[in-house]
Amino acid sequence: MKRLLIYCSLAVVGISGLAPGAEAARGVLKGRVFGPGGDPATDASLVLTSAVLERLFLVTSARTDGHYAFGDLEPGSYKLCAYLQGIGFAERNELTVRPPFAALADLELNATAPANGPFAPAPAPSRFHGHISDARGKDFAGAIARLLDADGRVVEIATTDENGRFHFMIEPNGRYAISTELTGYVPLFLHGLHADPDGPLYGRFIFQPKVFAFKTKVEEQAPEEELPLGGPERPLPANFHDWFPPDDDDCDEPPRPPIMGPPEIHPPPGPPPHGVRPPQ
């Protein structure tokens, strides 16, 4: 009976290929990377992604002869991408690794890297060119310009040169604002600014003097009661000169109406009634 149990145990180990406590076999993926003309793509970058673990990236580079190798791989399906700047891009899908055999995969770089892949080019910042002047085109040197992020924090500060020019570098994947100020002038703001991959950005800030802006506001809101008398907006009343003669302009107070005495009694014509004396 003991011999039978020993023979059964050896049979199970032979079928599974693993001794008790042994780890599963690991696989290898290797090959070469070539350029469009067939030359080895030295220093090409390679990224291997597991179909099961999509967020796990294994990265290596090709040697001088274009050879590469990924070892210690779990059995399964993989995706391989290769890229060399200035040369091209290539990818292979559904590469199967079956230990203990080595999987082979050669790649030829002849395409452009996709925009959403691991080798997608990083978005470049945009250069913002600013110009500060007045409405007549006079340039202002020494004006202050501030670059603010979406939270209002100051990212960079610039001062205009003798031609009223300044510039900022607008980083991608963000929204910015620019504030400009100069003593004696109304500050100006530019909101919702973001990097443009098609080229630089330009902005002109036209300053207005603070005094001019204040006077314009007062003149627009002047009440009608402050208009002078006698103008077309407020004609003089019909009896104005009865109460304010033209020669009384220097009086400290307006003249009062004349004081009226008792009314005069005029007897009717004819002889007075009997017993009534006529007034002397």
Image (cartoon, grey):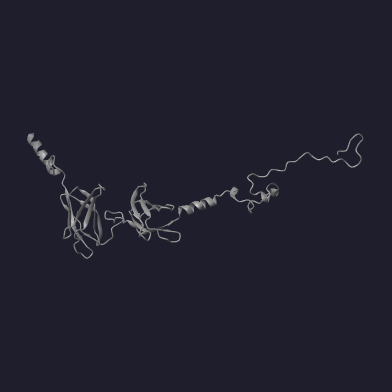
In the rendered view, does 251 fall on the left or right side of 186? right
Please provide percent x and percent y for residue 105.
Answer: 20, 56
Q: Is residue 128 in view from this perspective?
A: no
Q: Residue at x 60, y 48 (%)?
A: 225
In the rendered view, does 4 fall on the left or right side of 200? left
Q: Is residue 166 in view from this perspective?
A: yes
Above or below residue 142? Residue 279 is: above
In the rendered view, does 218 fall on the left or right side of 79? right
- In this rendered view, identify the residue nearer to me: 77 or 160: 160
Quarter-of-image position of residue 203:
bottom left
Q: How many marks?
A: 0
Q: Residue at x 59, y 49 (%)?
A: 226
The single residue placed furthest to the front in the displayed view is: 280
Above or below residue 13? Residue 110 is: below
- In this rendered view, identify the residue nearer to me: 235 or 27: 235
Q: Quadrant of the C terminus?
A: top right
Q: Residue at x 67, y 50 (%)?
A: 247
Please provide percent x and percent y for residue 143.
Answer: 38, 55
Please provide percent x and percent y for residue 132.
Answer: 40, 58
The single residue placed furthest to the bottom in the displayed view is: 37
In the rendered view, does 149 fall on the left or right side of 223? left
- In this rendered view, identify the residue nearer to me: 47 or 5: 47
- In this rendered view, identify the residue nearer to me: 186 or 171: 186
Please provide percent x and percent y for residue 278.
Answer: 88, 38
The single residue placed furthest to the left in the displayed view is: 3
Q: Quadrant of the N terminus?
A: top left
